[in-house]
Image: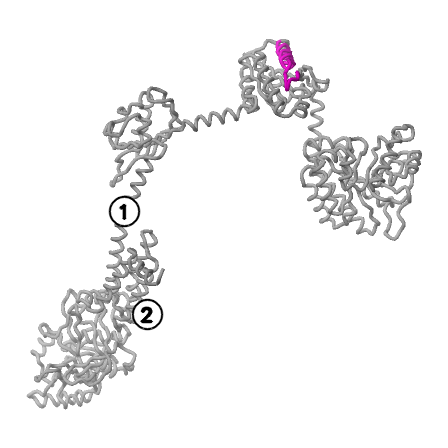
Amino acid sequence: MSTGQRLLNALGDRYRLPWLFALLVIAALYVKTPMSVARLDLLLHDLLSVELLAGPPSGGSVDTQAPLVIAIDDASLAARGPWPWPRERHADLVDRLSSAGVSGIGYAVMFAEPSADDRGDAALIDAVRRAGNVVLPVAPVASAGGGVGTLQPWPALADAAARLAHVDVEVDADALSRRVFLEAGAGSPQWPALAWALIDVSRKSRPLSGIGGRRGAAEPAAGSWVRDHEVIVLPGGGWPVAHLSANDVLAGAVSPNLLRGRSVLVGVTYTGSGNALATPASALAAPMPAVDFHARAYSALRNDRYSTQLAPVWSLPAALCVLAALWLRRPHARLRDMVLVAGALTVPLLISVVLLALARLWLAPAAVMIGLSAGALMWVSIRTVDLAQRLKQANARAHATLYAISDAVLQFDSALRLRYLNRKAEELCACRLAEVRDRGLEGLPAIEGALRELLQDLLCRCRDEARAQMMPGHVLMPAGRFGPARALRPSASPLFGMTGRVDGVVLVLNDVSDTVAAADKLAHQATHDALTGLPNRVLLRDRLRQALAQRDAGMVAVLFVDLDRFKRINDSLGHQQGDKVLTTLASRLRTVCRVGDTVARWGGDEFMIILQGLADRDAVARVAAKVMQAVGQIITLDDVDFRFSCSIGIAIAHEDSDDADVLFAMADTAMYRSKSQSGAAIHFYAHDMSAGTRDWIELESDLRHGLDEGRFEVHYQPQYELATGKLAAFEALLRFRRRDGQLLSPGDFIAVAEESGLIEGIGEWVLLQVTQQIADWSKQGLAVVPVAVNVSARQCLGRSLVRRVENALRQSRIAPSLLRLELTESTAMGDVDHVATLLADIRALGVHLSVDDFGTGYSSLSYLKRFPIDELKVDRSFVRDLVGDADDAAIVRATIALAHGLGMRVVAEGVENVEQLNMLAAQQCDLVQGYLFSQPVPADTVVSEGLLGAPEEQGRTLRLIRS
């Protein structure tokens, strides 16, 4: 898009047009300023100057530096005779003021020509000359031949005066006088203003170069009155001017102390004198005597309380900046845009206020404010039209939305007469809006009976309470001739009018039929098993608690049913066939039990049955026998007949326990007693069954606390090289000390630790403990050897073992080759792919790996070859009978040969006599360990016994001990 096209688009933007219009209005007002605009500027100046310029600079109600007005008032004329006075009386007045020590006298009385009394004229000339500080006035006067001349004292008197000064005062557009010109005169600005000349005579005024507004070059202009250095000296409100009656001065009634050092202005103030001026400071619009005006001008100039008006052109930059900002911003209808426009209107006035307050400069803001206001009005108009269009569009969209939404919307007036129905409401109520307009709920065919009463009450409460109402839950709209049953969630909201009163009510009927159906389905799924449809544990527990609360309903029994050897079906035929078995057996169990009994799936191949209302244990046993018989019936899978058996444990409510969870646990315990007898058995719970369970739980709790309390210990059993007899390594063996001091070996607690999940935390602790111990031995200067740490099957799940080994090595800073990990043969052959990856990652860290208990599991040589194994450990069960059992000897011999063939070392554990040692040596076994050499000992015993020597010493040779 070209620059011209973009400019045309900008000019055509309706949100920019107001500011272009404002610019045109401002330009028009500058070209030809109407009187009304000038008057507005003057009014603004008067209002602002009251706050910013008015008032004396020093405290008190009278400015002590202001001039005193010696008023020729009515009292003076009454006492001294009518006006005009003889010149001798004026001379007497000048002498008395001069003798009192005034600093200057501004005599605002025109003596244009000598009088008939030469003696009086001479007296006045002598008095003025003696005073030496009298300023006499000059004034513009129309010349007979056209133009403007000067009216001034006759020459002799003018020569005697200290200064001549003009008393010209300009009248503004509002017919008020508020400004003076510090210099003016006929043809050229040769005379100072009276107030300025009096200041000059009294206290030597400042130069005029920086004061007042200039009116061009001061070149002679014959026949015209030329003014310069314009200042506004009269604010909209002022301070009092002190008056002394001329009669009091002539009578000697005024103390010289009051006059000494003060400037005075002598002038006429009597009624009807005809020389008064209309000013902004005139009280009640009464004209102000001219002498008062000059006195106020004196004070304003003396105290820097005047202002200088700037040329109108100086307001244009501010106007252009504001308009440019509005043009670029393109304010719309947002609140911040409204604030922006309102702020823009105040900018010209704020600039004027700042200039007036800080620099005593007056910049007339009216033209700019009027232009901006015109633009703002146009912007408001455009905005109003735009908002009206948007409101119309919003109403159209709202109507379309209401018509399209899936909720039924009904609008009523304050009398609850129908005004609006959307499409969904018409479908739900089985009617058209035109058919039922102005009717109540009774006119809606599908809303009837209890539903109509309920909705009517909801509407009335909403209207009367003037707040939204909502029904808890949902209500049912019964099925009928107008359609199926529906679940509705009604809500009502009031509509308020301009007065704030309720004008109507909106009723919304939300069809939640699908939601309620889905919720019912979810509730069923939450309480029932997805496969069999039987109640799950949640519902089972609730049913049992209800049964326990009915103590008079007969015996309540809990049957725990577990299928025997069900895992073979999943493993051989797949889970799909296993699921078929479970659904078939669930159906049979429901058939066996009565309607009031509960059959639930506990999990996997386990079921729970709650029997209620039975007479005694025999009746319970008979039902259990039926259950076992039903489970034992033939099930055909893939054309193969299968028979299943089950183990059943029974707990009797109120006899065994009153707690639901405890009864479940007891039935579980009794079931395991049946399992322990090869299954297909029924056992009632007996209290002695829980002894083993309690021991298990207590040991689990003790292990959990022992990990936090530091009651685990690591003992070390040495491994020796058969070829050299040197110490080759240690195996770290875990011990647990119970609270009573009993020290347990791993065989007593590892199963519990694995089952409870504590083994991972314990295993991590062992890794950290062993690696730190190796680091401590190294710091002691001992010749450290590798230490083997056993790893459980659970630790090999996932990838956490690699991270924990890395962490232990990083914290201890030992060489990775000093750490070995031992895992059992069954663990290694569990998930071969996962274990192979896990061991490869560990081996990549530099840690050596061993397979423990080799020969006791089902190793695959091809799998074994895939693992980065460094050594095999022959299980102690083969070493124990090595001397007397040829089979064990053959196994050991084959294992050694296999390991050597794969490049692995062989460690024989459990060596307890010399005969075993000799046979192992004969078979070239690499390493041996066992009680023949040393029992597992604590770390400090390793040092005290000297099992580790210094690096430069020879390793401790193999020795046989019996301790």
Camera-side residue of 178 and 873: 873
Spatial distance from mark 2 to mark 1, Cα to Cα?
48 Å
In this rendering, position of residue 717 left or right of residue 252:
right
Question: What kind of element bears circle 1?
Answer: helix
Report whether 476 appears left or right of 287: right
Mark 2 and 1 residues: CB-CB less than 8 Å, in contact?
no
**Residue type for callout 2:** Leu
> Does 636 sit above or below residue 126?
above
Query: Bounds of the magenta span?
Result: 619-641
Q: Position of residue 2 (x, y in %)?
A: 35, 62
Give residue 358's mark: 2
> Residue 87, image x and y in percent?
11, 85
Q: Quadrant of the N terminus?
A: bottom left
Residue count near mark 1 (Cα–Cα under 10 Å), binned few <14, some 14–19, many ≥20: few
> Which residue is the site of mark 1?
389
Query: Is residue 638 a member of the stretch shown in magenta?
Result: yes
